[in-house]
Image (tube, helix red, strand yellow):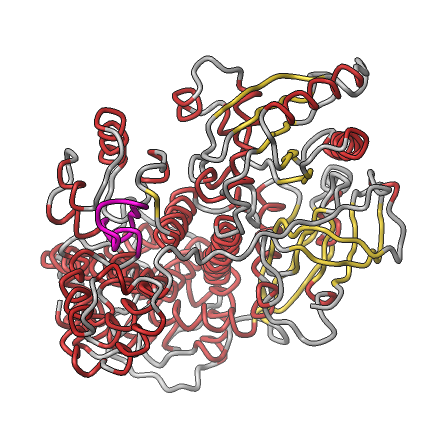
Amino acid sequence: MDAISKELSAEFSISKRYSDNIIQLFEEGSTVPFIARYRKESTGGMSDMDLRSFYDKWQYLVELNKRKESILGLLVKEPAASEQIKQKIRNAKTKNELEDLYAPFKKTRKSKADEAKEKGLQPLALAIWSGDYTDSTSAVQAWLGKHNVNITPEVALEGVVEILSEAVSNDSDILKQGRIELLKNGQLSSRVLRGKKEQGEKYRDYFEYQEPVKKVPDHRVLALLRGKKEAILKLSIHLMGETGYPRSLAFPHLNQLLNSDAQISHNLSAVQWRYLNIIWEHKLLAKLESDVLAQLKERAEEGAIQVFANNLQDLLMAAPAGAFRVLGMDPGFRNGVKLAAIDEQGNLLDHGVIYPHEPQNRTQEACALLTKLIKQHKIGWVAIGNGTASRETETLMKELIAQADLDCRAIVVSEAGASVYSASPIAIQEFPDLDVTIRGAISIARRFQDPLAELVKIDPQAIGVGQYQHDVKATQLSKSLGNVVEDCVNRVGVDINLASVSLLSYVSGLTNRIAQNIVDYRQQKGRIESRAELRKVKGIGDKCFEQCAGFLRILNGKEPLDESGVHPESYPLVRKMADHLALKANELLNNSSALQQLKQLAPSFAQAGDFTYTDILNELAKPSRDPRPEFRYAAFDQSIQTLEDLQEGMTLEGVVTNVAAFGAFVDLGVHQDGLIHISQLADRFVKDPRDLVRVGQVVSVTVLEVDVRRKRIGLKANGL
């Protein structure tokens, strides 16, 4: 374990002391949010993102070591496993390298090379390779007669190729260098399969395509692999400017692979090169091509998952509108517009359905009910889902507000995932007697109030802010997105007296069961008045309390510090700080003058540690602060309702719905997102679109191109 700590220390450029501390904290069951927030002295202030990477690498190295021990144990009874191979296994840095070394020893069935060896062709293969024998038909025939091998020269030479191919393609050094060679100098090509042009129209950019492997972006790799999976495209990799076996892979120890004592120079003979070229085409290139495509896929999946994670984080951390009374509207034509009015805490006040659009056109009746609901429940905002009939509903609502002089405003919001929530067990438990469509309207209204609190109830994969999310490993994606939600929830903090089970379950140290216990305790006892009271909840012991307490907020409770992010373990220190100024602890809250004095007195409290002391002062300065930005909304152009209404040169306002490696998608209110390509984000080079735009951001754009047939909108960003 000490070796692992040293390796992690080097990789993350931290002292081994910090590396040891972090491993110990993880082994003790501490969560990433807790360590990142309350154990900065032990980590040197490492961020939650770096701690996630540290944890993943630590787990990888632990699993790698276990696999090494397992393989070395299996090789004890393998006479062919030399000490040199075993040492290479001990020194292996990756799982791929380790499995390459072990591959020759884990055959599950007889290979063609094995069959050739059983026929006695191993000496012939070595003789031809070393130049002692030619591979002419007559020479091979003579060798077969001399050694009483009763097969034809043609079959014998096929066996020679199999023996040599296996020897070369089982060598871990050759495989490693071969992958490096293809990744560095390879050319990735694709072509459309015969008869698939019409079916694969969406892949037409790749019907005749090639690009250096090292330059292919992640999103293109996933597109190509999807085309391959759908049997539209044929993919291949070859070396640029070179044919046959690469000379960079001509290792001088190939003879040892054939159990020969003969030595060989770097300068291989013409015969040896000829056989290497046969091996390259016969077996090695296909194996390396498969390995490199797998590496590209893995890299692209990691990139796609990171894009999804970044977008999800931006969406969850979007500005909350706050505690307003909201009317949620889930628009539709034939099935009507579903309505749900909620109060400042998200509780359902009223609900209904109106049919203002075709085919019913009951507009007058709809306006009467809307007016009644808005006035009766003192609605401040109307949140309209951005699906079918959203613009028509928005137009209706804004005209009604103006005509009836209603004291509220209307806004279109993303309804991604609302239908998933409405049919989920969580929604059924919350509103067992309501129709699924009404539950959807409630979700739309609540996410306007607080996106984070509502979106945690939905499977992150259903929110739809990813790039090729359906092409990546589901378990890896789920883990990554779960981490994002956990980090966001703990960064914002949770009001324990208002939070749902879904929200509480993401708090550091709390399981779904304990979250349910907290809600049950609230329902039975009433308001929770202090963090200390949490210890009365079933399942919250010392370790659980340590991990969760700092992230749970109690407003207007018995202990004023409970509404801040100061951990209860630091309350004695805060009281000591207050005593130093002849104040009470609660008198430090929002007291800039006192906190400035304490900042100057930092050396007096050195035992707390610089990170901890600074964090405490920041929390006392703004005890109920929310790290999310201020709320802002886009004003869609009411004259632009459909794709056909768009014209090149128009300047419009929209909302960023998705950010990918190649640009950003923007909702303009026409039921089809437009794309700002990365080259159109600014008049300067942009490496990462997220440097300029985030999901939920309101942006001004100019329409560059409208392709109605392909439903594509090209945009240029203004003023970023």
Which region is colored magenta?
Answer: 548-564
Q: Report the residue at 27% width, 83% height from top.
A: 600
Residue 496 relative to residue 405: left or right: left
Q: Position of residue 91 (x, y in %)?
A: 22, 72
Q: Is residue 27 within the magenta segment?
A: no
User: Which quarter of the picture shows residue 445?
Assistant: top right
Q: Does residue 148 show up?
A: no
Q: Is residue 568 above or below residue 472?
A: below
Above or below 510: residue 241: below
Q: Residue 410, percent across and down? A: 69, 38
Residue 205: x and y in percent read 74, 54
Asked if the magenta segment contains residue 560, the reply would be yes
Which residue is located at x 22 percent, y 24 percent?
Answer: 524
Tally the numbered discs: 0
Please state, as top left, top right, bottom left or bottom right, where the N terminus lies in the image.
bottom left
Pick whichever, 577 or 393, lies toward us: 577
Does residue 159 show up?
yes
* 35, 76: nearer the viewer: 35
Residue 491 vs residue 669: left or right?
left
Residue 601 versus residue 636: which sits nearer the camera? 601
Name the residue nearer the viewer: 225 or 249. 225
Residue at left offset 62%, top offset 66%: 692
Seen from this angle, which residue lies furthest front? 582
**Residue 624 location (% of width, % of height):** 37, 55
**On the rendered image, what quadrant is the C terminus found in?**
bottom right
Is residue 342 toward the left or the right of residue 397 in the image?
left
Residue depicted at x 18% and y 56% = 568
